[in-house]
Amino acid sequence: MTDPTEPARHAFEYPDEAGHPDDKGTPSQDLIDLVDEVTDDLHAPAVDFAFVNDEKAGIYGAVVGDREIAGLPYHVAGDDRLVLLATSVFPEFRKQGIATELIRRALDDVRAQGKTVTVMCPIVHAFIERNPEYADLIDLKHPGVPRAHR
């Protein structure tokens, strides 16, 4: 839950096309929950999942059995950059470290490919702020949406 003593914690800037429920850029409770997850100190996800990079569909996924429980879609921007769009986790799997581990594995994959990222997802931005060892992956010419205000 959000703390009223931290009014700017979830004040994000978004592009107009981000599609917020109130059309004012106010994050939904789902977004707040995912940002909270990636800024908490969860060390391992509560659910063991397979990490999948579906290059044809352009999505990093977390899969349990035959069910995709979380995803991070992306666009390929040239040979050396991915645009990370929006992290999503099915509600019953939230607050269990799934988003955190999915983002970590996706960024590790980007690093292994020698690519950079443009971050359009505030959840990924929050993760990178909490884990600055991934900050070097952000493309300097095309960083994405502004970082969350603190």
Image (cartoon, rainbow, N blue to C red):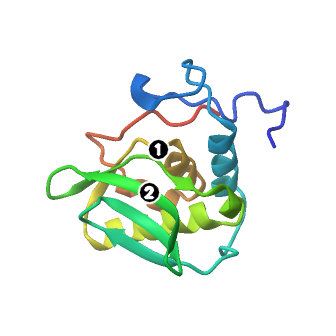
16 lies left or right of 93: left
SS at mark 2 in the image: strand
Front one among 87 and 143:
87
Above or below, 28 against 22 in this view is below
Residue drawn at x 61%, y 66% as measured from the top left: 98
Front one among 21 and 143:
21
SS at mark 1 in the image: loop
Outermost residue toward the top?
A: 24
Q: Amino acid at mark 2?
A: Leu
Q: Position of residue 99 (x, y in %)?
A: 58, 61
Residue drawn at x 70%, y 49% as measured from the top left: 36
Q: Residues within 10 Å of mark 1 (few under 14, many from 20)?
A: many
Tag 2–tag 1 contact (CB < 8 Å): yes
Residue 30 location, quadrant? top right
Q: Which residue is mark 1?
A: 121
Q: Quadrant of the C terminus?
A: top right
Outermost residue toward the left?
A: 79
Q: Looking at the image, is mark 2 or mark 1 nearer the viewer?
A: 2
Q: Earlier in the sequence, mark 2 or mark 1?
A: 2
Q: Position of residue 126 (x, y in %)?
A: 57, 48
Above or below, 40 against 62 in this view is above
110 lies left or right of 49: left
Q: Quadrant of the N terminus?
A: top right
Q: Which residue is mark 2?
A: 72
Residue drawn at x 64%, y 50% as measured from the top left: 34
Above or below, 33 against 144 in this view is below
Above or below, 9 against 47 in this view is above
Q: Amino acid at mark 1?
A: Cys
